[in-house]
């Protein structure tokens, strides 16, 4: 598939696809005679994983670590064990972000209450 086709099907811009390629998250097939990028249809699945992880706030390095598990050199059992470990790390990071969000919401609620109280005392 051409970069344009992948862009249209995935919703990612061509620039984003080139960036993900530079970062090692996706791979292009050898370039054509016109030096155009071409991708295997499997890249759409990888882009779905990237999109899901980015949507919950994971960074490029986290995603790269998780995607690296799919590469060869290990048995399936070893890759599965690494994937489970990587997923656990991502779960811990996600919980940390949830905790930070809860703290921020509590702080905002306190500020809102402080403003309301100050406004009420000003009116008196």
Image (spheres, rainbow, N blue to C red):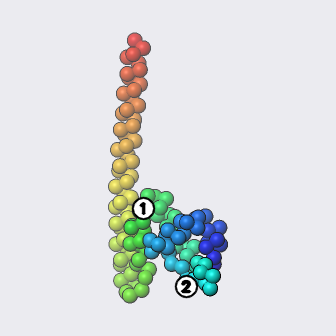
Packing grade of label 2 (10 A; few <14, some 14-19, many >=20) is few
Q: Please say whether residue 41 is visible from this viewpoint.
A: no
Q: Residue at x 38, y 46 (%)?
A: 102
Residue 121 position in % (x across, y down): 37, 17
Q: Is residue 32 left or right of residue 67?
A: right
Q: What residue lies at 39% left-to-right and 67% top-to-bottom?
A: 62
Who is closer to the viewer here, 100 or 34? 34
In the depicted structure, whether residue 88 falls above or below residue 121: below
Alpha-carbon distance for marks 2 and 1?
29 Å
Where, quadrant-wise, is the C terminus in this rendering?
top left
Q: Quadrant of residue 96?
A: bottom left
In this figure, which residue is indicated by the disc labeled 2? 30
Q: Residue at x 34, y 61 (%)?
A: 92
Q: Seen from this angle, which residue lies furthest top?
A: 124
Task: Give residue 32's position: percent from left, percent from top.
Answer: 61, 84
Q: Quadrant of the N terminus?
A: bottom right
Lower position in the chain sequence, tag 2 or tag 1:
2
- Residue ID for mark 1: 58
Question: Disc 2 or disc 1, which is closer to the eye?
Answer: 2
Asked whether the viewer can see residue 72, the reply is: yes
Callout 1 crowding tier (Cα within 10 Å): few <14, some 14–19, many ≥20:
some
SS of the residue under disc 1: loop
Along the line of sight, the residue nearer the viewer: 89 or 51: 51
Whether 13 is drawn above or below 41: the answer is above
The vertical placement of 14 against 116, above or below, is below
Q: Position of residue 123 (x, y in %)?
A: 42, 14
- The residue shown at (41%, 31%) is 112
Q: In this rendering, would 57 be left or right of 39?
A: left
Where, by quadrant of the figure, is residue 86 drawn? bottom left
Q: How many marks?
A: 2
The relative height of residue 122 versus residue 93 in the rendered view (above or below) is above
């Amino acid at each position: 598939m051409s970069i344009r086709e992948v862009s249209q099907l995935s919703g990612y811009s061509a620039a984003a696809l080139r960036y993900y390629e530079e970062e090692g998250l996706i791979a292009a097939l050898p370039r054509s005679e016109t030096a155009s990028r071409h991708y295997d249809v499997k890249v759409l699945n990888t882009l779905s994983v990237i999109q899901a992880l980015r949507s919950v706030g994971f960074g490029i390095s986290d995603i790269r670590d998780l995607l690296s598990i799919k590469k060869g050199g290990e048995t399936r059992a070893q890759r599965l064990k690494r994937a489970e470990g990587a997923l656990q790390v991502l779960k811990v990071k996600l919980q940390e972000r949830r905790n930070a969000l809860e703290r921020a919401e509590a702080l905002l609620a306190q500020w809102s209450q402080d403003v309301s109280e100050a406004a009420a005392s000003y009116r008196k």
